[in-house]
Amino acid sequence: MDHKKELKLQYKEIKTEAGIFQIKNIKNQKVFIKTSPNLKTINGIQFQLEHGSCTNKGLQQEWNEYGKESFDFEVLEVLKEKEDEYFNKKDALEKLEEKWLDQLQPFGERGYL
């Protein structure tokens, strides 16, 4: 098997973790909360912020104003997937998001919604 095919197979076998994460502005304590079926997307959001292309305008504006060092990226919870035919990842992520939104209340001056 050639090297490229082997790498593709290895990539497909890597298990992705779903869950919820936050980006916290440590200067003013505002938070951005997001769920993802693949928590590795945190890197993509950081890349977008660094290049000025984040779709959340408030977060992007403060990133530009305060700088990269003023933000903390943190996984809040990894989704525990069940080996159940009735398990729905999308629904489970929505419930997880509700839980953390209720807990952290990132609304108005406290968040980037």
Image (cartoon, grey):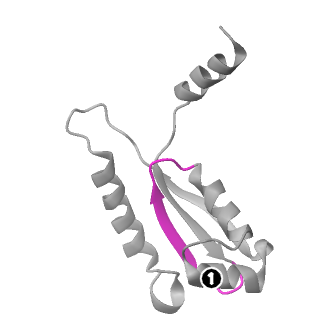
The location of residue 69, given as percent across then percent down, is: 79, 72
The disc labelled 1 sits on which kind of residue? Gln
The location of residue 92, given as percent across then percent down, is: 31, 52
Identify the residue at image location x=62%, y=62%. Answer: 45
The location of residue 72, given as percent across then percent down, is: 69, 68
Q: Is residue 7 above or below residue 28?
A: above
Question: In which image quadrant can residue 65 be found?
Answer: bottom right
- Please count the marks in the image: 1
Q: Which residue is mark 1?
A: 29
Tell me which segment is drawn in magenta. Answer: 26-39
Identify the residue at image location x=71%, y=84%. Answer: 27
Rate crowding at label 1 as few (under 14), some (14 to 19) or many (20 or more) other CA atoms within 10 Å: some
Identify the residue at image location x=66%, y=87%. Answer: 28
Q: 53 or 75, which lies in front? A: 53
Q: 109 or 54, which lies in front? A: 54
Q: Is residue 51 above or below residue 109?
A: above
